[in-house]
Amino acid sequence: MSDFIRVASTGEIPEGRMKKVTVGNQQVLVVNLKGKYYAIGNVCTHLGGPLDRGILEGNEVECPLHHSHFDVTSGQVKRGPATRAEPFYEVKAENGNILVKPK
Ligand code: FES
């Protein structure tokens, strides 16, 4: 079982913002929604678009390439062409640090 890994300080991801981080060999997107943090895969399950370069609207992120939407609170696809959900990571904030649990 892997332990949580520090990926950023809370100051680096203000409310309504997102950031790409690396957890082991995985690219992870960390999002701050109204002070709560969420983490899903950053690589679009359609053709690999970088979700951190997309648009965050409410709790959905839109891929910059072909505009798939993913729910950042679950990783689920909300709009295609993607059909596979993003991996969903446990994340927590502690003492000003954001920590993600690797898969
Ligand atoms: S790569 Fe993301 S929608 Fe195609």
Image (tube, rainbow, N blue to C red):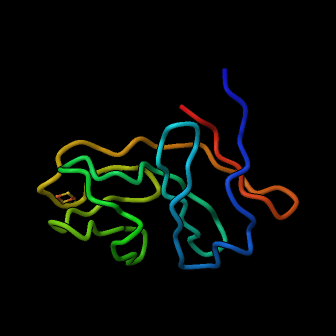
**Residue at image point 35% right, 68% down:** 61
Residue 43 lies left or right of residue 29; in this view the side is left
Instruction: Give coordinates of residue 67: x percent, y percent.
Output: 19, 68
Name the quadrant containing residue 56: bottom left
Instruction: Give coordinates of residue 101: x percent, y percent.
Output: 64, 38
Identify the residue at the far right of this view.
Answer: 95
**Residue at image point 19% right, 67% down:** 65
Q: Is residue 21 above or below residue 60?
A: above
In which quadrant is the N terminus drawn?
Answer: top right
Q: Is residue 9 above or below residue 21?
A: below
**Residue at image point 42% right, 48% down:** 41
Instruction: Give coordinates of residue 89: x percent, y percent.
Output: 54, 43
Please state the quadrant of the image where ligand 1 appears: bottom left
Number of callouts: 0
Residue 63 lies left or right of residue 20; in this view the side is left
Identify the residue at the far top of this view.
Answer: 1
Instruction: Give coordinates of residue 9: x percent, y percent.
Output: 75, 65
Q: Is residue 44 above or below residue 34?
A: above
Identify the residue at the far front of this view.
Answer: 25
Residue 51 lies left or right of residue 34; in this view the side is left
**Residue at image point 73% right, 49% down:** 6
Name the quadrant containing residue 80: bottom left
Name the quadrant containing residue 68: bottom left
Q: Is residue 22 above or below residue 29?
A: above
